[in-house]
Amino acid sequence: MSRDWPLWEVFIRSKGGLSHKHVGSVHAPDGELAVRHARDVYTRRLEGVSLWVVQSSDIVASDPAAAGPLFEPAETKVYRHPTFYDIPDAVTHI
Amino acid sequence: MYTTELGTPDPRAPVPLSKDDSDLVAAFEARVAADEFIEPKDWMPAAYRKTLVRQISQHAHSEIVGMLPEGNWLTRAPSLRRKAVLLAKVQDEGGHGLYLYCAAETLGTSREEMTEALHSGKAKYSTIFNYPTLTWADIGAIGWLVDGAAIMNQVPLQRTSYGPYARAMVKVCKEESFHQRQGYEIMMVMARGTPEQKAMAQDALNRWWWPSLMMFGPPDANSPNSAQSFRWRIKRDSNDGLRQKFVDITVPQAEFLGLTLPDPDLKWKEEKGRHDFGEVDWNEFYAVVRGEGPTAKERMKDRREAWEQGAWVREAAQAHETKRRAKLAA
């Protein structure tokens, strides 16, 4: 059994108007310290205006080995894209 | 900072391919050959995982140990500006170590295991950090040469096949450029200073030049690990190729400083379009890899002490969290 502090995934909002993006992880005993560690490790050069941390073990992920069947329905439905439809050039603003 | 991949115990032993399912291996190799990135939960051969854990953790250890020779000068930096800059650089090295430890942890090793491997002397780190920093000019030479060599090694690793490692390298490379420039600036000031200052700069260059060339690892002919690492895109350039490139770009930088590189065989070869240079003392390199570097014992002693002396902070933080949880539960 590891005596490491739990692992937290770190997300940064680089500036207002953008969503948080995953940048890496830190170890910390609790969320508050995880935010502090994330500040020191991932924002030494104004990389962000907001931080999220979430304990890594709380993340539920899809299985990469099952990526084929999982995303196949999106792949075969090309009619969901605007380029699927032929509209004559004469028709504008569409 | 950077370490080339140093195996343990025998740095030249190739990692054997295990009996992984050959279809999976073929699919994996096709993805890598197509320059796709491999991510933590993807299937990968055990030997790929093992090689990466070794290489990334050695790289992380190098960043962490790399704080020591420079930290040694924090209280003695010659001005407040230099002190602030050096502090920022040392803090970056700590950060780089942490990015890399996290990348290694995605492969299934734990931080604790890696820390213990370093502190017990089982794990390797870059040979360069087992040389002493005797004068302030050494801080200049380290930034210029050691970080310069590190950048040259790390830039191709931004496209290494393992996603978390490549992403860590992108961050590291972005931050490392300032390290090299602040070092070169120290050298410029000293080289244009009093004759004593210039002599200090030359002395530092004399001592750091050859160890810097060693940072690219053993000659290609003695690096049999490379073939597999190339195929798996863990390694993207040859040791000798990068070493040559480093020599070629550093020569004019030394000329600009008015300093002399300590190599009588160093000569520009017009017909080859590159410099010829003298043979690195590989016996010295392997001795330092074996842990016989001038400051190897001191570095590990300092590292262990820092870890042990920080134990009460880690314990207090844990106790605080335990108490908070108990209160919540009550």
Image: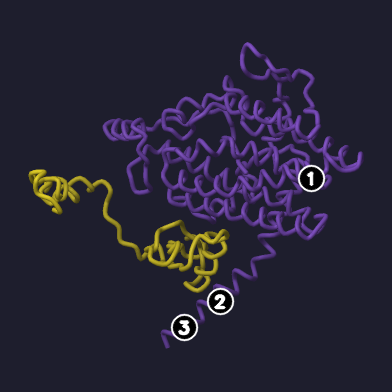
Q: Nearer the viewer, mark 2 or mark 1?
A: 1
Q: Are marks 2 and 3 in contact (CB under 8 Å)?
A: no
- Give the x, y percent position of residue B187: 78, 42
Per the image, the residue denoted by label 1 is: B133
Shade representing chain B: purple
Subunit of label 3 = B
Q: Are marks 2 and 1 in contact (CB under 8 Å)?
A: no
In this view of the protein, which residue sits in the foreground, B303 or B144? Answer: B144
Estimate how packed mark 2 is, as few (under 14), some (14 to 19) or many (20 or more) residues with alpha carbons within 10 Å: few
Mark number, residue B319: 2
In this view of the protein, which residue sits in the foreground, B293 or B76? Answer: B76
Subunit of label 1 = B
- Give the x, y percent position of residue B85: 70, 55
Residue drawn at x 77%, y 53% is B72
Q: Are marks 3 and 1 in contact (CB under 8 Å)?
A: no
Mark number, residue B326: 3
Q: Give the image quarter of residue B84.
A: bottom right
Q: Is residue B318 above or below residue A48?
A: below
Shade representing chain A: yellow
* Residue type at the position of mark 1: Thr
Between the C-alphas of marks 3 and 1, the distance is 49 Å
